[in-house]
Amino acid sequence: MTLKVGVIGCGYISYAHIRGWKANGCEVAALCDLSAGRLNARAEEFGVQNKYTDYKEMLERENLDIVDIATPVSTHRALISYCCSRVSNILCEKPFVDNMENGEYLVRECKKYGCRTMVCQSYRWHPWYEQIKKELKNDVIGSPYYVNIMQRISFDIPYGKENRIPLTEDQPFYEHAERLMLLEQGCHYFDVFRSLFGEPQAVTGTVGRISPFVKGDDLAVVTVVFPGLTAVLEDVWCSCGQQKTSVTYIQGEKGSIYFGGTDGIAPHRTEECGSLTITFFDGSSRQIEMEAADYYNQSFAKLQAHFLHCIDQGLTPDTCFEDNLKTVSIALRAYESAAKKRTIFMGE
């Protein structure tokens, strides 16, 4: 049976969402956006006939199996609390929420109505993190004890001869977000940490605001402590030169895993990535070449395939709302740590 999907939000990120649903054999039955311009452009691009500027009208008129919410986090409480009683399955863009109170409320509401949920944490479906998870599961480097993920991009500062600012081109609503980088993108890396290593014990964060073109944070170093393992995220949106995303190093008892990262201003702007290198203490090593072609869009299709499998089999998605609150809490504790200038333990 072909499942019918309604997408709320036709901004930049909706392209990957709609393309992914179609790749998975779903019918994108309706689109909704407050902006008629965005709505009509995306509908024409993908040949979607049913268009709405009011999500309530869309839910009343359309018989949908899935609602896909691809809007800024500030809209999520109202949208999800309305949709969860009227549709059986909700996929929501990250960050799911920007505070724990809203998240706990929405988890309760969705449970009350039996609505299956998933958050669009696409990075865990990037090919290098999928491969790293396999290598760790196979105990190739033994028990890991140190991890570092580094990103350097010029996302919120003028770059190149044209002085382009990618953030304002792609997602201009980021300009006014007070909690920006760590919540909007850092959550991807915190989700990767949790996917690979389980649940953390403590968080220490240093957060900076450098670019005059955004209100929120665009530089951070966050240490996340897991049992027997220290993970460090270095995230910089205000870097000029050496543009790199997702450079990853993992040290274990028997050796290390290194991924050279993707090149370019932002992950969705490159098809280039390095190989995965596994090095052992005896000096030997092996390389695993990583296929980068269309990886950014493919990660959306893969997470949607996981959601569809869970719907078909009656399972709980890996990044359901309840689980994703644990990821959001890492970002929130990093901000709290930076403000209080001390380590924050997860039980606090």
Image (tube, rainbow, N blue to C red):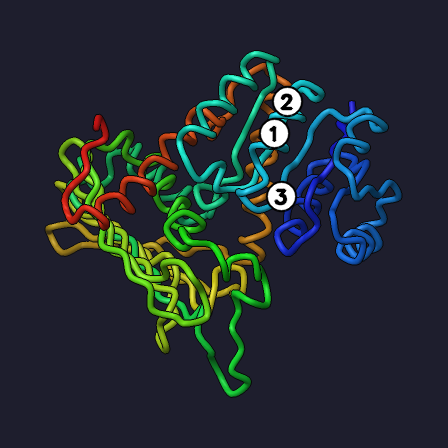
For the residues bearing labels 1 and 2, Cβ distance under 8 angstroms? yes
Describe residue 119's horizontal placement relative to residue 54 as left or right. Answer: left
Type of amino acid under label 3: Ala
For the residues bearing labels 1 and 3, Cβ distance under 8 angstroms? no
Instruction: Tell me if mark 1 has few (under 14), some (14-19) or many (20+) residues whose alpha carbon lies within 10 angstroms of its own.
Output: many
Instruction: State the image quarter where residue 202 is shown.
Output: top left
Q: Is 273 above or below relative to 101? A: below
Describe residue 315's horizontal placement relative to residue 150 as left or right. Answer: right
Type of amino acid under label 2: Cys
Work out whether mark 3 precedes mark 2 in sequence or the reverse, and give the earlier one. Answer: 3
Return the residue nearer the eye: 98 or 184: 98
Can the viewer see residue 278 in this picture? Answer: no
Which element carries disc 2, helix, strand or loop? loop
Type of amino acid under label 1: Ile
Return the residue nearer the eye: 291 or 165: 165
Instruction: State the image quarter where residue 152 is shown.
Output: bottom left
Which element carries disc 3, helix, strand or loop? loop
Q: Which disc number belongs to residue 80?
A: 1
Between the C-alphas of marks 3 and 2, the distance is: 15 Å
Q: Which disc number belongs to residue 84?
A: 2
Work out whether mark 1 precedes mark 3 in sequence or the reverse, and give the earlier one. Answer: 3
Residue located at (66% from left, 26% from top): 82
Q: Which disc number belongs to residue 70?
A: 3
Pair 1/3: label in front? 1
Residue located at (18% from left, 33% from top): 345
Residue 107: % across, % down: 49, 21
Quadrant occupied by the C terminus: top left
